[in-house]
Amino acid sequence: MLPDSGTERLVIRLLERRDLEQVRHLHNHDETLLRLTDVWPVSETQQEAWFESVSSSRTARRYVGRRRADDALVGVFRLDRLDPWNRNAYVGADVVPAMRRQGYAEEMFAYFLGHLFDHCGLHRLALVTLTSNTAALALYRKLGFVEEGRERQAIFRDGGFQDLVLMGLLAEEWRGRAG
C-alpha cells in the first residue's frame, strides 16, 4: 500500500490495464529505448502478456505517476528483483519525453525511496544505467546512490560500446541525506 497515493503534483498508483497503451508508447519511444538495456519495441500483444506476468509477480511491481492537474501520464516506476528476506530490490523509472527536465523523476524517486526504506523496511536499493545517460547519473548521485561497479562495454549504442553502471543506496545513507 502506498502512503498518501503520491506527491503534491503526482498521483502514484499501481499500473493498471487502462495505462497499458500509454506505457507501451513511452517504452517504444526512441528516446526511451536508447536508455534501456532491452531495445526492442513492444507490441500490444507482448504488452498484454507482460502486464499479466508483472501483475502476478512476487518480485516485481510497476507503478505509474500521473499529474494531479490533468491525469496526464508522467512516467513509470519499476521495482524489480524484490527480495524481502535480504531486504533489497532494484529500482528504475522512465519519464515521458515531453515531461523530462521538470523534476518529475526526482519527485518519483524521492517518494519511492522514502516508501521503500521507511515503510517497507528495505535495506538496500540498486539500479543500473548506461554511461551515456548523464542526466540519470546526475540524479542518482544527487539522491545518494553510489557507484558500486560496472559491466565494461556491455551495451552497444550509437555505433560503439559503453559501460553499464551499477549503483546502490543503503537505507542509512538515504536517511542521513533526508534528515
Image (tube, rainbow, N blue to C red):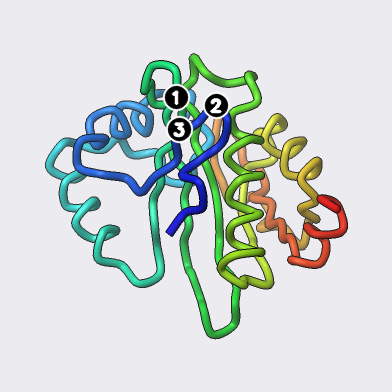
Q: Residues within 10 Å of mark 3 (few under 14, many from 20)?
A: many
Callout 3–callout 2 Cβ contact below 8 Å: no
Residue shown at 57% from the left, 21% from the top: 100
Q: Nearer the viewer, residue 157 or 149?
A: 149
The residue that mark 3 highlights is: 75
Q: Where residue 40 sits: x, y (%)?
A: 33, 39
Query: What amino acid is labelled 3 in the image?
Result: Gly
Left or right of residue 52, residue 98 in this image: right
Q: Where residue 20 sits: x, y (%)?
A: 24, 37
- Tell which residue pokes out farthest to the bottom in this image: 85
Q: Please, what secondary structure does the residue beneath circle 3 have? A: strand
Q: Residues within 10 Å of mark 2 (few under 14, many from 20)?
A: few
Q: Where residue 54 sits: x, y (%)?
A: 29, 58
Q: Nearer the viewer, mark 3 or mark 2?
A: 2
Q: Residues within 10 Å of mark 1 (few under 14, many from 20)?
A: some
Query: What amino acid is labelled 1 in the image?
Result: Arg
Residue 11, by quadrant, is top left
Q: Please, what secondary structure does the residue beneath circle 2 have? A: loop
The residue that mark 2 highlights is: 9
The residue that mark 1 highlights is: 68
